[in-house]
Amino acid sequence: MTSSLLFNATTFLFLISTILFFAFLATKQNAIGLSASMAAFLGWGVETVAIILRWKESYDMGHGHAPLSNLYESVVFFAWTIILIYGIIELKYKYRVVGAFVLPFALFGMAWAQLGLHSGIEPLVPALQSNWLLYHVITCFLGYAAFAVACGISIMYLIKAKAEGDSSDASAGGVISMFPAIRVLDDLNYKAIMIGFPLLTLGIVTGAAWANYAWGTYWSWDPKETWSLIVWFVYAAFLHARITRGWVGKRAAWLSIIGFAATIFCYLGVNLFLSGLHSYGGGR
């Protein structure tokens, strides 16, 4: 059994989970919803084993590094963290329907990694040969995953707010009625961002320490660093506006979605379209 086979199995399980979540929306049958969650968590478990196995394969090949060093490995890990954060929220708050708006993110990541990215295990470039790799990547991607969950919840909020404000939208009533209440969705969005923001902050701090180790300077205004700071300011603005000005509702939901769009550009857009000290992550 190889890690590639297990990653393929993970992608299939996330596909099944996504289909089941949509079926859950359509049928309102709790058994289907439970099956969707179980498929997602089983996929997460299989992916956990795959990541550990890929780490072992790296040592067997003589490279000996954590599977977090190129675009393929980071996308796979991103999908893993999304399911982790979603699982925590589902188990704590019992709103299974959120999975229909979060699982597609993980599925898209896994499908893109398996079908469109080079999956070979290669030696680390010198800048990555540090334990800071683990600290920086893990904290950043846990933060990104929390923002992905917040984005899914915000989309649900906007759909429900529109449906409640449009009395002619009778056809959507059956599905929309499954969503948590508006105030609950708003609160879940806030809580997800409260998970992600400290993790992103820690990721930027560990990244600065790593930059000093690798390049001799804590900050160089590299495109990745600049966009990380932009993302940080977006979510800092979200929290500041909510705490000091009581920003809730649609404004908060839109800011959450904008923040996640900036996060995706920071993660993928910078690597794929801009050159800089982090450009080694783009073409691999």
Image: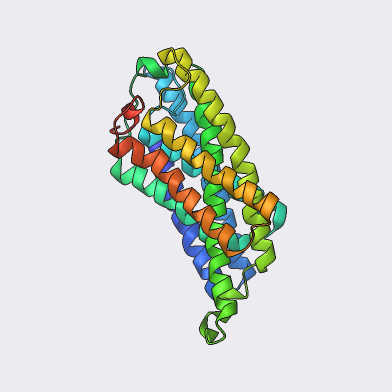
**Residue lying farthest to the front in this orientation:** 245
Residue drawn at point x = 53 percent, y = 74 percent: 26
Q: Nearer the viewer, residue 107 or 222?
A: 222
**Residue lying farthest to the right in this orientation:** 92
Question: Residue 99 vs residue 181: left or right?
Answer: left
Give the image location of residue 214, x and y in percent. Answer: 42, 14
User: In which quadrant of the rendered view does residue 15 lie?
Assistant: bottom left
Q: Nearer the viewer, residue 34 or 195?
A: 195
Count of number-bearing discs? 0
The N terminus, quarter of image: top left
The C terminus, quarter of image: top left
Q: How is the image coloured?
A: rainbow
Give the image location of residue 211, x and y in percent. Answer: 45, 19
The relative height of residue 245 versus residue 227 in the rendered view (above or below) is: below
Residue drawn at point x = 57 percent, y = 85 percent: 167
User: In which quadrant of the rendered view does residue 68 lie?
Assistant: top left
Taking the image as drawn, is residue 242 in sight?
A: yes
Q: Nearer the viewer, residue 200 or 148?
A: 200
Taking the image as drawn, is residue 35 in sight?
A: no
Residue drawn at point x = 55 percent, y = 65 percent: 156
Give the image location of residue 180, x and y in percent. Answer: 66, 67
The relative height of residue 270 versus residue 149 in the rendered view (above or below) is: above
Give the image location of residue 51, x and y in percent. Answer: 48, 33
The relative height of residue 10 versus residue 35 in the rendered view (above or below) is: above
Question: Residue 259 vs residue 84: left or right?
Answer: left
